[in-house]
Image (cartoon, coloured by chain):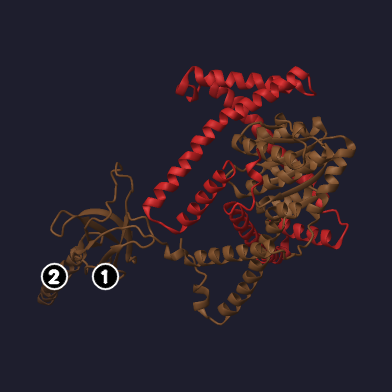
Chain colours: A red, B brown
Amino acid sequence: MRRQLPILIVFVSGVFMVIQYFIPHESFEFIYEYAMDWIIIIGIFAMLLGLWSLTRASVSKVQAKAPGWGFSVMTLVGLATMLFLGFYKGNKSIAEGTFFMDLFWYIYTPIQATMFSLLAFYIASAAYRSFRVRTVLATILLVTALIIMLRLIPLGPISGVNQWLASWILTVPNMAAKRAIWIGVGLGATATALKIIFGIERAYMGKD
Amino acid sequence: MRYKNLNRLLILTFFFFFLILPLGQILAQEDTLPPAPPTEVRASDTQNDNGHSITITWKLSGDDGAGKKDVVAYEILRSESPAGEFVVRGMVPAGNNTYQDRGAKEKEDKNYFHPYHDFYYKVRAKTLNSYSESGVAGPAQAYGQWFHLGKLPVFVGTLAFTIMVLAFISLARKGKKFYVRPLAGIDAVDDAIGRATEMGRPILYILGLGSAADIATIASFTILNRIAKKTAEHKTKIIVPCNDPIVMSVAQETVKAGYLDAGRPDMYQEENIFYITSMQFAYVAAVNGIMLREKTATNFYLGKFYAESLILAETGSVAGSIQISGTDEIAQIPFFVAATDYTLIGEELYAASAYLGREPLLLGALKAQDLAKAIVMISLASGAVAASFHLDFFLRLFTVQM
């Protein structure tokens, strides 16, 4: 029964979600929105689990003096500080000018922007590896990339030809490949959903 | 000479008072004259909706797009009785002959649209200075539909695909053997785990930034289960940092199940599957730190990824790890192809668990996918031919209205 009940819940929920897609009636809309609200509620409770997990992992690293345990200390200090400042003034803590928001805007946001900006350098290094001419396919990739990259640069008499070629590459072979992947993804996602709804795929459920 | 000028003056005065002045007055009146009213106004329930909307159609005013009485817009008015007060519900520019009178479904909303209630409509054609109204149309009631006819092609396709999946699974149950083409990324899994075992280093498994409700994350759970089983068999440590607490809970159960399947429940360590943060780049920073500190031998990136995909994969590449990636996010696939050793493209992510498990039932579902793809390809080719010969009925078969 401990195995059958979750499978039954998954089956009923899964079949309902499929059916409600085809029924616009508000009674089904209501149940759908009710279910979505439950996801939010579960998510909030799960956040407590997450907090517990993060604290436990960080504390055990500090206790064991594992490599990089100093980062775990910073994590715990940051976590405790933000929790304290957040709860201390309640809703007022997210008003502009509070210490809580200052930490968010002047420490967290710049760090996040720094991480994101690293992407530019990583794109350059990944492009260098990809475009190295070693095979016929890599050569085609290089030539295609050059055409696409140069489409925004004035190239005198060949500008028009280059722009036409770049546009053709994007709208014909590139779009065809994208759509092929989309169709495959759609079928794969549907097949996976069916396997889960019918209880064929149960790995995500764990075991007793 | 004097009389001649007087005559001219009289003729001009005559023209001014009896011809030009009346003509000016007539033309001035033209501006304030009401335009021809809209006709054939119809009000009916909006199809394929939740029951809080009525669609109004009309025949355009004869002065729509004509001369000085040019209609500039149409106002739609509603009342609860034919003789009651009509209030303006909306406006559309000239040239349009349809309006959907929509309202809220929440009773406490001031714009609540009462279903199963009689409403009457009028359409007002407006010029810059005047207007004219149509006759009253109605009563019309709004009510929700129990089937969205515009989604019929999707329904038929889903039903047909479900039947195909069940049929192939039934064949698999009866013992039919299916051939599936090899996938390089899947074939490399055993080697990657073996390498980690030989090097005595852990394996890193990233489920992406998707929630537990994302189908790509669910597919990743099933792969994680198979990989956890293999790592348990090889006695290799697996680290699963998560960015969603629900995903973490499911991942813990999934890994535990893998260790149980391998007969090594004692080796399972819950603290290796942990939550970091839900913030995208803070999560990336933490995972990059784990890669560099733990010197992971193998990194798996399977699930839903966004801008962080390349930062993760490049860091793994710098750290010298073998990397296997897979996502259904098309924008991230090129990054993974460029920066990781093996990439599962799109649907291969969903197929991976069947490949790893080699269970006949799961392979049966894979064959159904192959058949469906063949049908899609035939339909695409037929559609191209049909469109070339203007056979619109064939194209309409596949038209979906949302």
Dot 1 falls on a residue whose secondary structure is loop
Which residue is at a point 42% across and 65% down the rendered structure image? B149
What amino acid does circle 2 point to?
Answer: Pro
Q: Which mark is residue B22?
A: 2
Residue projecting furthest to the right: B198
Task: Give whichever of B312, B37 is nearer the camera.
Answer: B312
Which residue is at a point 79% across and 47% down the rendered structure image? B340
Q: Say which quadrant the N terminus of chain B sits in.
A: bottom left
Q: Nearer the viewer, mark 1 or mark 2?
A: 1
Mark with earlier residue (1, 2) = 2
Q: Is residue A84 visible?
A: yes
Mark 2 surroundings: few (<14), some (14-19) or many (≥20) residues within 10 A: few
- Image coordinates of residue B180 in percent, x first then y, are 76, 62
- Image coordinates of residue A163 in percent, x first then y, are 68, 63
- Image coordinates of residue B157 in percent, x first then y, are 54, 66
Which residue is at a point 76% across and 52% down the rendered structure image? B356
Q: Numbered disc 2: what chain?
A: B
Tell me if B36 is positioned left or right of B147 in this view.
left
Q: Which residue is mark 1?
A: B63
Q: Quadrant of residue A172?
A: bottom right
What amino acid does circle 1 point to?
Answer: Asp
Q: Numbered disc 1: what chain?
A: B
- Image coordinates of residue B363 in percent, x first then y, are 71, 59
Q: Quadrant of residue B33?
A: bottom left
Does residue A189 lie above or below B383 as drawn? above
Tell me if B100 is positioned left or right of A63 in this view.
left
Dot 2 falls on a residue whose secondary structure is helix
